[in-house]
Image (spheres, rainbow, N blue to C red):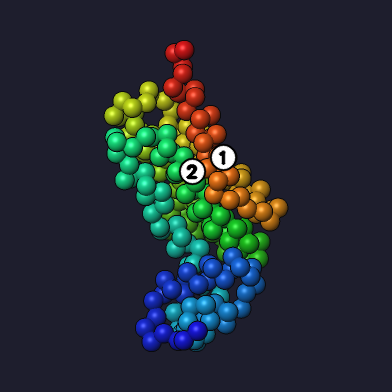
């Protein structure tokens, strides 16, 4: 791959995440450099060590705005379909982040206290980030009287919790569901989580 004259740090971080997912946490920085289209020296001119590079690559994922579709949804959208789509999108995010977090934690141990670092930088961990985002959407639905009042933090956890378990299971088994399976899974989870809210008076 041709070397780039101007180097965007995010290009290096994205390459790091991609190569780690493909080859594992023990990947050489030379492989990351090749994927990013930069020299290995360029990497170390921005990140002092491989540990620093991996740390920033992981933490930078927590800065991103996940589930933006919830922010874009309005009254014309079917909120059930919006939540189903949010779960499918959440699965995609978790499949990228969680395996890297788990591998990094196993490889670096106490040298890379990800959860402590995330807390220090005031970043939410992936599961908390998703739950908070869904909770805000549910709060908005209640405010607009589209669903009855409920404990939105618990409902959000019911919606996101199974996704976390699903991705953990896939990671340990080395499997991955396709999009149609994800959509079926999302439909079942939303139906289960909302049933108690929408049918309490029946």
List x then y, in percent, for residue 137. 37, 38
Residue at the image position 50 percent from the left and 54 percent from the top: 93
List x then y, in percent, for residue 35. 52, 77
Name the residue furthest right.
Answer: 173
Mark 1 or 2: in front is: 1
170 vs 56, nearest the viewer: 170
Q: Considering only vertical position in the picture, is 132 above or below 61?
A: above
Q: Is residue 96 left or right of residue 69?
A: right
Residue at the image position 57 percent from the left and 71 percent from the top: 19
Number of numbered markers: 2
Q: Considering only vertical position in the picture, is 150 above or below 185?
A: above
List x then y, in percent, for residue 181. 58, 44
Mark drawn on residue 87:
2
Query: How dense is the environment of label 2, judged by Cα within 10 Å: few (below 14), some, or many (20 and up)?
Result: many
- At mark 2, the secondary structure is helix
Query: How dense is the environment of label 1, judged by Cα within 10 Å: few (below 14), some, or many (20 and up)?
Result: some
Q: Is residue 35 left or right of residue 142?
A: right
Residue bearing the label numbered 1: 185
């Amino acid at each position: 791959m041709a070397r780039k004259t101007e180097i965007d740090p995010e290009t290096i971080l994205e390459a790091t995440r991609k190569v780690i997912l493909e080859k594992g946490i023990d990947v050489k920085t030379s492989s990351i450099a090749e994927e990013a289209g930069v020299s290995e020296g360029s990497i170390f001119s921005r990140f002092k060590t491989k540990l620093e590079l991996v740390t920033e690559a992981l933490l930078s994922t927590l800065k991103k705005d996940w589930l933006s579709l919830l922010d874009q949804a309005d009254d014309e959208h079917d909120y059930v379909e919006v939540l189903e789509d949010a779960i499918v999108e959440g699965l995609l995010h978790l499949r990228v982040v969680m395996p890297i977090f788990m591998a990094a934690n196993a490889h670096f141990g106490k040298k890379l206290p990800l959860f402590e670092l995330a807390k220090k930088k005031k970043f939410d961990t992936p599961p908390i980030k998703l739950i908070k985002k869904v909770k805000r959407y549910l709060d908005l639905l209640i405010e607009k009287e589209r669903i009855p009042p409920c404990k939105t933090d618990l409902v959000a956890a019911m919606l996101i919790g199974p996704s976390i378990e699903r991705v953990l299971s896939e990671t340990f088994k080395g499997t991955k569901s396709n999009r149609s399976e994800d959509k079926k899974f999302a439909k079942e989870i939303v139906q289960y989580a909302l049933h108690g809210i929408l049918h309490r008076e029946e």
